[in-house]
Image (cartoon, rainbow, N blue to C red):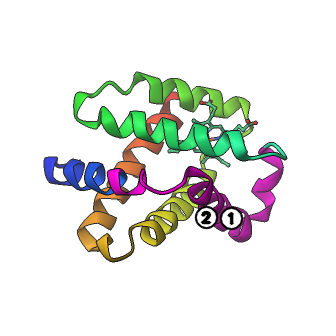
Amino acid sequence: MTAAQIKLVKRSWRIMMGIDPVLLGETFYGKLFNDHPELRHYFPKDMKEQYIKLTDMLSSIILRLDHQALSSVAEMGKRHVGYGVKPAHYNMVGKAMIWMLSKGLGTEWDRATEEAWIQCYTEISALMTSAA
Ligand code: HEM
């Protein structure tokens, strides 16, 4: 990611963090399970905790984007193998994430922000799958 892209991701994530995490979770997983119902069974029945885990983890990754402290991302990739997650799933999750961001950011969402997030997600998921 370029320095400008890191800035865009951080700025837009700060806006997203002003939104209720339950609403974010319902938007993200709602989109994911609507587009890919076959993924629902990987997750627990009650998703409330998962919403918080996802936003907390994204917050901690984004906070440290410019510090290369990404070993926790690799560890997370290894844990995901244990959840049954396959490399092909990352694209599906990435699409739902971009969709959630575009809805949450509304008029703050533009082409450069989209590109910055795609780059960010591509780098994180590459780290996760290569560690796996
Ligand atoms: C950048 C990509 C992703 C991030 C940041 C992320 C984040 C997380 C976090 C923080 C957890 C909590 C447990 C842990 O830390 O190990 C988790 C669990 C999980 N994730 Fe992901 N994840 C990502 C990609 C995916 C993908 C592609 C799938 C595929 C469907 C997936 C499916 C799951 C499942 C099934 C669980 C366990 C749920 C449970 O049984 O409690 N994740 N994820």
102 shown above or below 1: below
Magenta region includes residue 103 = no
Nearest to the observer: residue 127 or residue 61: 61
Q: Amino acid at mark 2?
A: Thr
Q: Secondary structure at mark 2?
A: helix
Q: Residue at x 60, y 46 (%)?
A: 87
Residue 112: quarter of image: bottom left
Specify few, some or many for label 2: CA neighbours under 10 Å numbering under 14, 14-19, or 20 or more: some
Residue that appears at 51% across and 57% down: 94
Percent across and percent down for residue 51 are 63, 46
Residue 29 painted magenta? yes
Q: Main secondary structure of the magenta part?
A: helix
Q: Is residue 110 above or below residue 117?
A: below
Query: Magenta stretch?
Result: 14-43
Residue hosting label 1: 30
In what element is the residue under mark 1?
A: helix
Q: CA distance from mark 2 to mark 1?
A: 5 Å
Give the quadrant of ligand 1. Answer: top right
